[in-house]
Image (spheres, grey):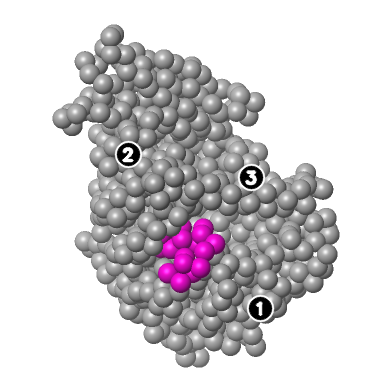
């Protein structure tokens, strides 16, 4: 027996003899653990949730596995692993690698022996236990297993049906056949992430299981693809430190998008790319900005944000387009082959780019990964008939104080003639402002800036509404049509409404229809409302949902009556839910009782109840507070409870003297500890931030100091910072918001009067 010392930070072992550099020594540790604080979680029924199942599951990322077994918990440490677990029947044990044996012991209990013979990082070691039914499939000779609760087999097949095709596609795209002997996916109750890419044994939230009706709007393919991509990016090749974890999450996010392009087509790919960018922009604008690669963080989990996931994926998309498909695939294959089963940093990826292309791409890596931000462009053009030139103006308008560097990037300008022929002109943007003179025999029918939407940017495209209408109707790329819809929304005249209405009805892709509807909702004239009422006939549920959302912008009895049948019943859960919320936003008489009635409806992940609760925040009626108090308590469904807490924060903002709201939000931190309370606690932090009251600061500071989950700590710190910076501004902001609403209403009325004058009505 060796001497050792143990404290809160680890175990120090005194070896029997010195071990020199390059030598090895084997040490066995006999240990036990009860009720680990992190890393391994136990969940089951209690008096408030009697229908919950007994399950146990681990969650090692970032550095939490050390809480349930002794280890050097760092991503650079790669080890083989082995787990023997004994459970009562009918429980099933799933872990990494291969199931070496399963047998019944002398007590009639089941013993599972799993072994992972390839070294993998500590945080990827996994254990999941539950009364599961195993569903099976295969990719070539590789078995695929899906573990779901009994009674949910049909949902399980629907959720995981594309797994084999995703494995095949990623094997082709990476040039590396799936690198392990089997692949399992386990759904976990009360799971605190969407998914976790444990080597060969991914854990997924039970919330991804869905019925046929939900499948109209919802798919698990994106989550399944993201976690599967990690088997190459993160598991096979692992970042040496968390600072470079974009090499995991950026690639997993982008390869998920690539599978969308393969399986669903280019339009869906581009639309998801847009949505990804928008989530990154929102975090950049409203919370903070940072470089993708950084060593500035309190805990590793701080890095796992929208900069890391969609922000990195958008940068990889640029690289793919700049390199071209052939060299892109060569770089990916070289990177994975050279570094498989090892650890890497960003520089290793940069070297692979250089080796394949023969060019130095340090400028790209430095600008897009080691520096924060993105260009904000203002573009316009004018044609000189006499000189036969098109002058293309491009200006970088990003804040010079926050983004001191000027971005360098290639930019394509596409000139489209009256006959539809296109000519691409490539320019290099290197300064804050450029004026490019492009020879053109005649004025182009259409000018498209960055026609394939390669560059990560925000852009204002300043051309006349006629050209925008043509772009909305004729541009091939869906993002160029969406760009035109956004610019026409800013124009907002009768012709713009007509163009948006036509796109809403006739564009071949639902995403353009949805953005056109969003534009009509923002214009808020009588003509726009009538267009939206007609738009309810669109067949795609996601486009119809956007029409419903837009109609909620109109505080009008006609909008209320139009939405009422959809709130009662629609083929889509999501359309029905959105109709309930839109009705609340109309603030029409009868809206409150309709929203209350919607609380009785069961739906996928309680989407209808959640939207109804959000509706109380729009109605802002004191009667809604009692309902929100009830739905925020421990015992209500997890997503419903979290939503109620968030809306309490919103309603409390206009009730600064109501201390009961603060008390009800604070109750989230009095509930039993465990993963079941995670989302409620996160929502309570968001609610306290929204409340923006000094009375909430002591609780937020205590959360930041005492909570174990790094995401709760990070969000509490951000909330404290925001409240302390914004002291005494809350009331002024409320008044400003009210003034803006009043201005929007007056603007709508003025537009309606102008429209009537112009039309001679």
Question: Residue pushed farthest front?
Answer: 760
Decide: few, some or many residues near mark 3? Use Cα within 10 Å; few <14, some 14-19, many ≥20. Answer: few
Q: Is residue 293 above or below residue 35?
A: above
Decide: few, some or many residues near mark 2? Use Cα within 10 Å; few <14, some 14-19, many ≥20. Answer: many
Upstream in sequence: badge 1 or badge 3: 3
Q: Nearer the viewer, residue 260 or 122?
A: 260
Q: Residue at x 56, y 22 (%)?
A: 405
Query: Label 3: which residue?
Result: 287
Q: Residue at x 65, y 26 (%)?
A: 401
Q: Is residue 23 left or right of residue 419?
A: right
Residue 484 visible somewhere in the drawing: yes
Dominant SS type (magenta): helix
Q: Position of residue 342 (x, y in %)?
A: 44, 43
Q: Residue at x 73, y 64 (%)?
A: 652
Q: Which mark is residue 705?
A: none
Query: Label 1: which residue?
Result: 627
Q: Is residue 388 magenta?
A: no
Based on the displayed image, in which of its 4 quarters is residue 251 positioned?
top left
- Figure quadrant of the N terminus: bottom right
Rounded to the nearest angstrom, the CA distance separating label 2 from label 3 is: 35 Å
Query: Label 2: which residue?
Result: 469
Of badges 1 and 3, nearer the viewer stands 1
Q: Position of residue 608 (x, y in %)?
A: 49, 73
Q: Is residue 615 left or right of residue 625?
A: left
The region drawn magenta spans: 545-563
Rounded to the nearest angstrom, the CA distance separating label 1 from label 3 is: 31 Å
């Amino acid at each position: 027996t060796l001497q050792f010392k143990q404290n809160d930070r680890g175990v120090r072992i005194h070896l029997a003899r010195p071990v020199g550099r390059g030598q090895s020594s084997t040490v066995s540790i006999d240990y036990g653990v009860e009720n680990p604080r992190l890393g391994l979680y136990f969940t089951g029924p209690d008096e408030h949730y009697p229908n919950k199942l007994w399950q146990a599951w681990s969650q090692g990322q970032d550095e939490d596995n050390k809480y349930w077994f002794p280890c050097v918990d760092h991503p650079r440490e790669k080890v083989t692993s082995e787990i023997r677990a004994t459970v009562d029947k009918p429980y099933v044990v799933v872990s990494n690698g291969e199931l070496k044996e399963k047998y019944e012991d002398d007590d009639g209990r089941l013993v599972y022996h799993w072994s992972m013979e390839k070294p993998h990082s500590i945080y990827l070691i996994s254990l999941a236990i539950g009364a599961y039914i195993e569903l099976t499939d295969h990719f070539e000779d590789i078995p695929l297993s899906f573990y779901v609760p009994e009674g949910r087999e049909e949902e399980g097949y629907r959720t995981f049906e594309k797994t084999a095709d995703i494995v095949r596609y990623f094997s082709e795209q990476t040039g590396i056949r799936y690198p392990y002997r089997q692949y399992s996916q386990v759904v976990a109750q009360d799971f605190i992430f969407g998914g976790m890419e444990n080597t060969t044994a991914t854990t997924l939230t039970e919330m991804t299981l869905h019925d046929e009706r939900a499948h109209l709007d919802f798919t698990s393919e994106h989550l399944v693809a993201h976690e599967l991509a990690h088997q190459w990016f993160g598991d096979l090749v692992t970042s040496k430190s968390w600072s470079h974890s974009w090499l995991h999450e950026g690639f997993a996010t982008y390869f998920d998008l690539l599978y969308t392009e393969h399986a669903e087509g280019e339009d869906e790919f581009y639309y998801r790319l847009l949505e990804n960018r928008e989530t990154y922009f929102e975090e950049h604008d409203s919370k903070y900005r940072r470089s993708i690669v950084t060593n500035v963080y309190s805990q590793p989990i701080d890095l796992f944000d929208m900069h890391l996931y969609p922000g990195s994926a958008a940068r990889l998309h640029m690289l793919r387009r700049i390199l071209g498909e052939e060299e892109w695939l060569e770089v990916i294959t070289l990177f994975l082959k050279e570094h498989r089963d090892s650890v890497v940093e960003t520089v290793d990826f940069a070297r692979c780019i250089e080796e394949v292309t023969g060019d130095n791409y340090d400028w790209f890596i430095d600008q897009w990964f080691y520096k924060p931000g993105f260009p904000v462009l203002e573009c316009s053009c004018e044609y000189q008939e006499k000189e036969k030139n098109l002058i293309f103006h491009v200006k970088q308008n990003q804040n010079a104080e926050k983004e001191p560097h000027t971005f360098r990037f290639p930019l394509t300008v596409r000139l489209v003639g009256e006959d539809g022929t296109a000519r691409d002109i490539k320019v290099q943007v290197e300064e804050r402002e450029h004026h490019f003179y492009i020879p053109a025999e005649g004025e182009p029918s259409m000018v498209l800036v960055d026609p394939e939407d390669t560059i990560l940017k925000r852009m204002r495209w300043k051309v006349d509404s006629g050209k925008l209408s043509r772009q909305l109707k004729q541009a091939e790329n869906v993002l160029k049509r969406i760009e035109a819809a956004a610019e026409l929304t800013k124009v907002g005249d009768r012709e713009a409404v007509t163009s948006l209405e036509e796109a809403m009805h006739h564009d071949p892709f639902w995403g353009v229809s949805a953005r056109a509807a969003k534009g009509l909702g923002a214009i808020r004239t009588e003509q726009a409302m009538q267009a939206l009422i007609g738009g309810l006939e669109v067949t795609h549920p996601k486009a119809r949902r956007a029409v419903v959302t837009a109609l909620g912008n109109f505080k009008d009895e006609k909008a209320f009556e139009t939405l009422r049948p959809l709130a009662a019943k629609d083929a889509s859960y999501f359309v029905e839910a959105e109709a309930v919320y839109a009705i609340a936003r109309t603030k029409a008489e009868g809206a409150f009782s309709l929203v209350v009635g919607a609380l009785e409806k069961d739906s996928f992940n309680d989407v209808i109840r959640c939207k109804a609760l959000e509706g109380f925040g729009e109605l802002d009626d004191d009667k809604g507070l009692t309902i929100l108090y009830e739905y925020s308590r421990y015992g209500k469904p997890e997503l419903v409870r979290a939503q109620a807490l968030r809306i309490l924060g919103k309603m409390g903002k206009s009730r600064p003297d109501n201390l009961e709201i603060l008390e009800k939000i604070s109750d989230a931190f009095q509930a039993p500890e465990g993963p079941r309370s995670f989302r409620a606690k996160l929502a309570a932090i968001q609610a306290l931030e929204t409340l923006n009251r000094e009375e909430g600061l002591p609780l937020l500071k205590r959360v930041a100091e005492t909570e174990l989950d790094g995401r709760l700590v990070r969000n509490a710190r951000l909330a404290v910072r925001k409240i302390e910076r914004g002291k005494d501004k809350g009331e002024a902001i409320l008044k400003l918001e009210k003034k803006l609403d009043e201005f929007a209403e007056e603007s709508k009325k003025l537009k309606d009067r102008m429209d009537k004058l112009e039309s001679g009505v």
